[in-house]
Amino acid sequence: MGFLQANDETRFPDPIYRETVLKPLFDGARHHHAGALRQIDRAHLVMLVETGILHADQGMAIARALQAMEREIDPAALSYGGDVEDYFFYMERELKARAGADIGGRLHTARSRNDIDHTFLKLDLKPRIDRVLAACRQLLAALIEVGTRDRDVLIVAYTHGQPAQPTTHGHYLAAMIEVLIRDMERIEAARDIVDLCPLGAAAITTSGFPIDRERVAELLGFAAPLQNSYSCIAATDYLTAVYSALSLLFLHLGRPIQDFQFWSSFEVGQLYLPNAFVQISSIMPQKRNPVPFEHLRHFSSQAVGRARAVVDVMHNTPFTDMTDSESETHEMGYQAIDVGLRVLDLLTATIRAGRIDSERVAVNLSRSCATITELADWLVRSEGLSFRLGHEIAADVARAVVAMAGDLPTDGYPAFTAAFEHHVGRKPAAGAAEFARMVSPEHFVAIRDRFGGPAPSALDAALAGYRDALGAFELQATRIAERQAVAAAALERRIQDLAKGG
């Protein structure tokens, strides 16, 4: 007995199945995948003719029919009527109507919807990844630009929500840059997995026909064919790799976005956004609301959640061809990419527009005694004390200055001499002027001239490396674009030749 019972009088599709499954899939395919399916048909046809699987006159008839379909069918104008199973069969029906049932049916030689589906899904995913990487390069360029501009601009660095030490805005942005570079490398690595072509795997095991999988991959702009044919139709690591990398990108960007919102609060005020990025309260005219940061938090959370949803859908699925990994799951991923692009564009603009309020930074550094660590370090270097003893002296000085609401460089010397004499039993060697210079924020940054530190020479070296990384990303993007342009031109040329009988 076959799959259908002999007495089954119902006709496929059931109306509910048509509306809940087939129609949404048809609409998704015509919206997202029509162009990719057209390219697959063309590349497969070229390969079939070049390998002799189809005769030249058969290839000519199919090529002409495909060209006519491209001129005559607008996928956006189609509506699903239930008379075919899906978009693929609709297009096959249209091909047969133009080339004849026998000739039109020959295009499906040595292929299956299994390998076709994964190929057009990859073809549609690659340009979306490329748009994300292009937006990342713009953000990286903005961070390098502003980090260079603000190489010497002091900020308060916070730990546990409290003022900790002075550093520079450039140094902070450099930390963002390094994470972004690693995220971009992860996305590029995931793209490399996507850039392997499944076409030619057919249903599972390739074909008995003498197909040329390398030629099809080349014509479609892939880097190479994916080798194992079972993997071509079963593996979903190209999906999980991409969306895991994307979720990390937006998770990581969400952290400095939180900082920027905190920095722009009235109480902290170290980051100022111009009026073009500020909304005023409808009832409280004194309020400047730096709303881009709220939207950025929300958008980045949306991107993380949607990207993770794609990965979660793959959990505990069978290692075989399955609907779980197909169009509707990819559409969730496209939503993650769309909202993620909004994050990247808006964050790039706000990074370039924001300015550090140096007066507020100076006040906050003064009130918090944020340079006091350097006093302890300096006592080790200049007075030969242990760091623990230097730390105790520094703590006494900080308590005294904070209690008087004073400024450490200006008001801290008397407290310093008293604490030093109490703990050491003698007067310190340094006078008031040396003390003030040593606990200044400028000295704090300048003396931290170590690999990865905020001092100008260390930060300049880092920024030079980041520029090199940006250049490498741009070169890779150019190479990919050139390869795909060459492939598209070659495919178009071969189809034109086939249509002319060549």
Image (cartoon, rainbow, N blue to C red):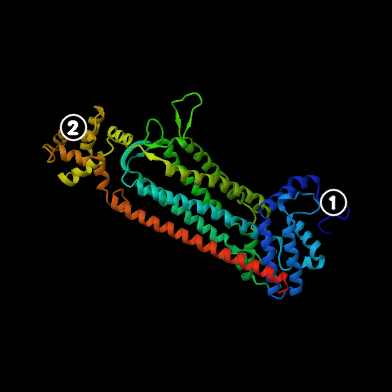
- Residue 111 is tagged as none
Residue at 25% in and 38% down: 372
Residue at 74% in and 45% down: 20
Task: Pinpoint residue 453: horizontal percent, then vertical percent.
Answer: 31, 50
Type of the residue with mark 2:
Ala
Question: Relative to 498, is 6 on the left or the right?
Answer: right
Question: Relative to 97, is 311 on the left or the right?
Answer: left
Task: Pinpoint residue 130: horizontal percent, then vertical percent.
Answer: 54, 55
Q: Secondary structure at mark 2?
A: helix
Q: Secondary structure at mark 1?
A: loop
Q: CA distance from mark 1 to mark 2?
A: 92 Å
Which of the 4 image quadrants contains residue 274?
A: top left
Residue closest to the eye, 308 or 126: 126
User: Which numbered disc, 1 or 2, marks the residue that appears first in the sequence?
Assistant: 1
**Residue at which label 2 appears:** 415
For the N terminus, the quadrant is bottom right
Type of the residue with mark 1:
Arg
| Residue 221 visible in this rendered orientation of the protein | yes
Residue at 45% in and 54% down: 182
Residue furthest out toward the top = 283
| Residue 320 visible in this rendered orientation of the protein | no
**Residue at which label 1 appears:** 11
Task: Pinpoint residue 32: horizontal percent, then vertical percent.
Answer: 66, 52
Q: Residues within 10 Å of mark 1 (few under 14, many from 20)?
A: few
For the C terminus, the quadrant is bottom right
Note whether 114 is above or below 308 in the view shown. below
Note whether 443 is above or below 395 in the view shown. below
Q: Residues within 10 Å of mark 2 (few under 14, many from 20)?
A: some
Residue closest to the eye, 486 or 267: 486
Residue at 75% in and 54% down: 86
